[in-house]
Amino acid sequence: MRSLASDNYAGVHPAVLAAITAANAGHAPAYGSDSTTDQAVAAFRRELGDQVDVFMTFNGTGANVVG
């Protein structure tokens, strides 16, 4: 049976899993002090402008709290 109650009922898309696997190498500082976060922030700023602030959250509830 399929359910549309939540976006986390299904498995991850293979491309997403491949990106996570590629990022899971070596050591990096935690809590936003890593190169992956720097790359993500740079991508947001390219799209939305340099004035944008980026707040990474774990899940939708975290994003709702920040919002």
Image (cartoon, rainbow, N blue to C red):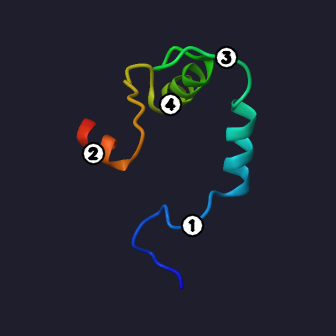
Q: Amino acid at mark 3?
A: His
| Picture quadrant of residue 62 | top left
Between 54 and 3, the residue placed more toward the observer is 3
Q: CA distance from mark 2 to mark 1?
A: 22 Å
Which residue is tagged 3?
A: 27
* Numbered disc in front, either 4 or 1: 1
Which residue is tagged 2?
A: 64
- 2 or 1: tag closer to the N-terminus: 1
Q: Residue at x 44, y 19 (%)?
A: 50
Q: Amino acid at mark 4?
A: Phe
Between 67 and 49, the residue placed more toward the observer is 67
* Numbered disc in front, either 3 or 4: 3
In percent of width and height, residue 48 lies at 45, 32
Q: Residue at x 75, y 45 (%)?
A: 18
Which residue is tagged 4?
A: 44
Q: Secondary structure at mark 3?
A: loop
Which residue is tagged 1?
A: 10
Q: CA distance from mark 4 to mark 1?
A: 27 Å
- 3 or 1: tag closer to the N-terminus: 1
Evaluate if marks 2 and 1 touch, with contact meaning CB atoms under 8 Å apart: no
Residue 54 left/right relative to 25: left
**Mark 2 Cα-neighbour bin, 10 Å: few <14, some 14–19, many ≥20:** few
Q: Secondary structure at mark 2?
A: helix
- 2 or 4: tag closer to the N-terminus: 4
In percent of width and height, residue 30 lies at 51, 18
